[in-house]
Amino acid sequence: MTIKSEAENIEHIEIEKKVLRKALINACHKLEITPKEFGDLMGVKGSSYSRFIGNAKDHYHIDPNSKNGEAALMFLNIYKALFAINGGDLESCRVWLRTKNKSLGNVPIEMMASMKGMVAVLYYLERIKG
């Protein structure tokens, strides 16, 4: 591998981290995710939310291969499925996330505090979506 290709690879990885962060921020805003919910989803303290969302210098990146990166990607897949099922109606998406679901047996956003819960919610949405 040449020095140039290694540098390009590093730059590509940094871009992926920034894109993942931006996508997560956008989805959180659209779904009105609270700091506590964000903390539960990402496995961090809720106080990290304001630093993560508000950091204009983009120091807070998410490595897609990290535990937080996997949680972020799972959350984004849930967001995409929920958005598609609800025809883009964000209010319906917000209500669904915070309402007890008979089939799931719990409130989806509460289930999503664990990776197991996120997988269950995504699986359920993918089955509905067909």
Image (tube, grey):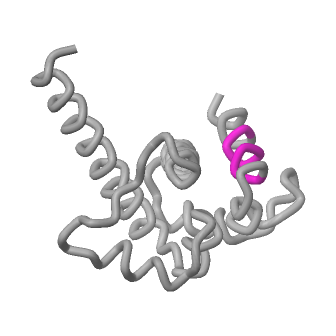
* Residue sitting at x 77%, y 45%: 120
Say if the magenta span includes residue 119.
yes
Q: Nearer the viewer, residue 114 or 107?
A: 114
Residue plotted at (42% across, 48% down):
63
> Residue 25 vs residue 119: left or right?
left
In the displayed image of the protein, which residue is found farthest to the bottom? Answer: 47
Q: Quadrant of residue 1?
A: top left
Q: Which quarter of the image is occupied by the C terminus?
A: top right
Residue 103 at x, y percent in the picture: 86, 51
Residue situated furthest top in the rendering: 1
Residue 101: percent from the left, percent from the top? 80, 60
Q: Which residues are magenta?
A: 117-123
- Relative placement, left or right, of 3 versus 30 is left
- Left or right: 60 in relation to 104: left
Q: Is residue 54 above or below residue 17?
A: below
Residue 9 vs residue 35, the one in the foreground: 9
> Percent from the top left, x then y, of residue 81?
55, 42
Picture residue at 41% right of the left edge, 57% below the top: 24
Magenta span dominant secondary structure:
helix
Question: Is residue 80 inside the magenta stretch?
Answer: no
Identify the residue at horizontal 74%, vertical 68% (top origin). 110
In the shown orientation, is residue 77 left or right of residue 115? left
Q: How many marks?
A: 0
Which x, y percent locates residue 90? 46, 62
